[in-house]
Amino acid sequence: MVLAQLGGTITRAIRQMNNATIVDQKVLNECLNEINRALLNADVRFQLVRDMHNNVKRIVNFDDLAAGHNKRRIIQQAIFNELCNMLDPGKPSFTPQKGKTSVIMFVGLQGSGKTTTCTKYAYYHQRKGWKPALVCADTFRAGAFDQLKQNAIKAKIPFYGSYAESDPVKIAVEGVETFKKENRDLIIVDTSGRHKQEAALFEEMRQVSEATKPDLIVFVMDSSIGQAAFDQALAFKQSVPVGAVIVTKMDGHAKGGGALSAVAATKSPVIFIGTGEHMDEFEVFDVKPFVSRLLGMGDWSGFMDKIHEVVPEDQQPELLRKLSEGNITLRIMYEYLQNIQKMGPIGQVFSMLPGLSSELMPNDQEVESQAKIKRYMTMMDSMTNEELDSPNPKIMNESRSMRVARGSGCDISEVMEMLEEYKRLAKICSKMKGLKIPTRRCDMNT
Ligand code: GDP
């Protein structure tokens, strides 16, 4: 996933800075240069990268910092704040209320992932107890209604559309009225896309918007266009009052960072990102937790959201208790990995885990990281109870590691790698000892 690549480079740069014996101007410059390169590779606009670089250097002025100041923390905090500023549009989006009807209209170019995203959005809310419904007002693309219908049936979401009617405004109005009568609280209207920003598309959007009076217009955009997202988002905003953006295909393109920062520059809030073709490859986008993940600091709120979605309710308190106790044994890491496997598309959750971010996702290889997890678990299957339950990572000395390698049919270097991963996790978790881990996303925000 693109974020893992960008995040991996940034995390490594910060880790190198943290590992330096003395943090001076040279170390800071190296760290910032590495981060700049990563951002430019992700197609973030040069001016934004330059401003970030200059701002961090201004904040971290070595001449002004008295001895005893924690320079590493100050630098990390400055980088965190600057990345947040880069992605923050400074404007919240309209938030629909459960139980109260909201009409959400989706617009975007053809192929951007609009129809898929409508269903993902509906499905996401349905799992959280909403009563969504889908209306297909795309009469331009042959097969659009069939696609929406198939997705809706799969997700068990009511839908409305017509094979015979060619007027999108009429279908949109009828669909919205039908679902209002049925007390659906989230009525999602999918509109036509075109290959390019042409006048007819904008006119049709305006008409559907005027007729259905949506509470929110969501612009769906493909991340592969990178910083060109700025012009595209502005063009749509000038035509209809776009209130939020969803950036899709963040799984496949190296330009995701550029797209996100470009959208923020148009002062439009990004509310979700699409991270795959499947219905559940869809994530809430919040600037702070997102940057936290990029910096390898984890995203507890996103992680908790996932835990609540996939870990059986009766097992949640136990898992949370263990995490907040801070003493992470190899057995807990084993359970951690087991849970991650249950959580479906691994890429979604991995970078949310503090301490494990990007390390188990080398080179974007989802399949590879799945295989790696399985191998780690096989190695742990060859461990004794004493080894699995010891709170001391040093228990795994050389002879024990050799035995595990033989028993699991793995290479000793792989066992060492897994133990390194464990030590890193144990170190992070030990710092979290006594911390109150948020139990829901909203706990994090308040
Ligand atoms: P529309 O023309 O804008 O309605 O686009 P579609 O919803 O038909 O999507 C176009 C293609 O993009 C389809 O093959 C989708 O499966 C794919 N797609 C949509 N969102 C994502 C995403 O987040 N990641 C990936 N990899 N593919 C996506």
Image (cartoon, rainbow, N blue to C red):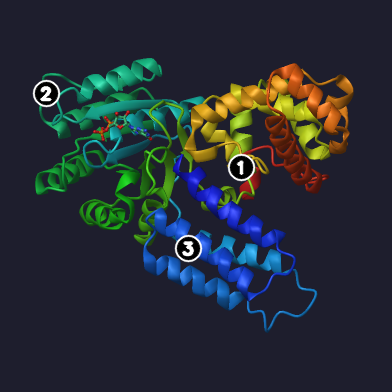
Amino acid, disc 1: Ser
| Residue bearing mark 3 | 36
Q: CA distance from mark 1 to mark 3?
A: 20 Å
Looking at marks 1 and 3 on the same chain, the residue that comes earlier in the sequence is marked by: 3
Left or right, residue 298 beside residue 113: right
* Residue 117 quadrant: top left
Report the residue at 75% width, 33% height from top.
Answer: 320
Q: Position of residue 242 (x, y in %)?
A: 30, 50
Report the residue at 39% width, 58% height from top.
Answer: 44
Q: Name the element at disc 2.
A: loop
Q: Specify the quarter for ligand 1.
A: top left
| Residue bearing mark 2 | 165
Of the two numbered discs 3 and 2 in the rendering, the one whose residue sits closer to the viewer: 3
Looking at marks 1 and 2 on the same chain, the residue that comes earlier in the sequence is marked by: 2
Left or right, residue 346 beside residue 318: left
Q: Name the element at disc 3.
A: helix
Residue 357: which numbered mark, if any?
1
Other-residue count near label 3 (Cα within 10 Å), few / some / many at <14 / 14–19 / ≥20: many
Other-residue count near label 2 (Cα within 10 Å), few / some / many at <14 / 14–19 / ≥20: few
Q: Name the element at disc 1.
A: loop
Residue 210: which numbered mark, if any?
none
The single residue placed furthest to the bottom in the displayed view is 63
Q: CA distance from mark 3 to mark 2?
A: 52 Å
